[in-house]
Image (cartoon, rainbow, N blue to C red):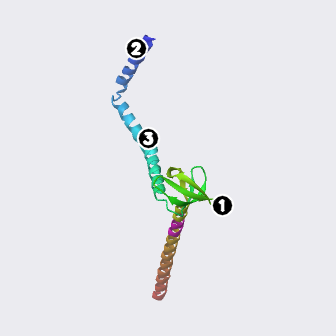
Amino acid sequence: MNSILLMAQAGGTSAAQQGGMNPYSGIILMVVLVAVMYFLMIRPQKKRQKEEQEMRSALEVGDEIITIGGIVGKVVTIREEDIVIETGADRTKMKLQRWAVNTNVTKTEQHRKEIEAAREAAKEKKAKKNDKKEISDSAKEAEKRIEE
């Protein structure tokens, strides 16, 4: 067993010497791997956690929320670490921890409406720009006809 390990070690060093491999390539590879893992896994997760924390801290009375367990309700009371929501037609009140809030439906709907309004405004702006372009094109054609 020891002879196999010695042969493998000797073969590895001779291969590294023959191939001209840089002794720091292993360290460089590890640094690159850690950097890639940070940008692909750790950073996006921290960003999501920060957004969730901001959403939970921005809850207001009257907001409609969905909890992690799937309970839908309207916020009635807000305290430091917990909230009271009202659910169902019989207006049952439940006390929940803030961390149990998954989605703020009210803010999500407002965000969607803002996005739709921005898209509509962009479409209108583009249409006006195209109309102005058509008018200037028709004016140029009219000038050419007059010159002829």
Q: Residue 142 carries which label?
A: none
Residue 114 drawn in magenta: yes
| Whether label 2 touches label 1, CB < 8 Å | no
- Mark 2: amino acid: Leu
Mark 1 — residue?
90
Q: What residue do we see at 41% from left, 37% from top? A: 33
Given residues 27 and 115, the one toward you in this image is 115
- The local secondary structure at tag 3 comes to helix
The correct choice, above or below, for 112 with respect to 51 in the image is below
Q: Could you tell me which secondary element the residue under label 1 belongs to?
A: loop
> Which amino acid is tagged 1?
Asp
> Given the current orientation, which residue lies at the most extreme bottom position?
146
Quarter of image, res 25: top left
Residues in magenta? 112-118
Tell us which disc is closer to us: 1 or 3: 1
Q: Mark 3 touching mark 2, by CB under 8 A?
A: no
Query: Picture coordinates of residue 20 (x, y %)?
Result: 34, 27
